Image (spheres, helix red, strand yellow):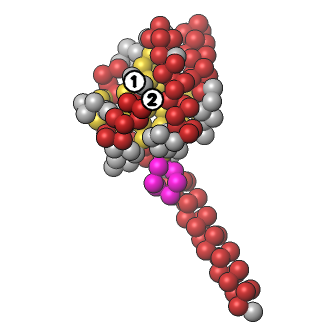
Amino acid sequence: MNFTRTILGVLLAAVVLFLGVRMFADSQSIPQVGQMAPGFTLPSQEGTNISLHQYRGKWVVLYFYPKDMTSGCTIEARGFQADMGKFDAVNAVVLGVSVDSVKSHQEFCAKDGLHFKLLADSNKKVVAEYGSLGMMGMMANRNTFLINPEGKIVKEWIGVDPHHHSAEVLDAIHAMQKNG
């Protein structure tokens, strides 16, 4: 009898947790392709404030990731770093955003030789504005938004696979430049 109550209690707790997470996820809205990208200003790993409007006239790869120095995030960041010359060649800048601190970003960049901007959204405002706050509000989801030189979102990737993501983004930029 006690075993059954324990199992029922665990199941009830799991259902309540699932519904709470689901309601939280549904309360966030992901900006849509075609709309202007929400503006922001956040500190980079260098401690300087970076604003989206600084990059008007360039393609912006705005990618959200869960946590510095974890395996998937390291794979994704190294992919972007390895392709940095290709992004420069298509007039694109890469901006990574997580809820980690400036100090954590400094350590991540030093450890993995990252030279593009990592932005610290410790108050989770920008992550939430881009509908990318996950893990019960504790981390960012792995989402990417491609913003054109006019400031509009032209492509988004939700739930990114970090292994070949940099190449996917470059392919999308090339296709848009060719067609546009």
> Please, is residue 63 above or below residue 11 in the view?
above
The image quadrant of residue 179 is: top right
Closer to the camera in the image, 99 or 45: 45
Under mark 1, the amino acid is: Phe
Residue 117 lies, in percent from the top left, at: 37, 27
Q: Quadrant of the N terminus?
A: bottom right
Give the magenta-colored segment's residue range. 132-139
- Can you tell which mark lies on residue 116? 1
Query: Image point 63% across, 30% down: which residue?
Result: 163
Q: Is residue 136 magenta?
A: yes
Residue 69 lies, in percent from the top left, at: 47, 40
- Can you tell which mark lies on residue 143? none
Q: Quadrant of the C terminus?
A: top right
- The residue identified by callout 2 is 112
Q: Is residue 110 magenta?
A: no
Closer to the camera in the image, 154 or 144: 144
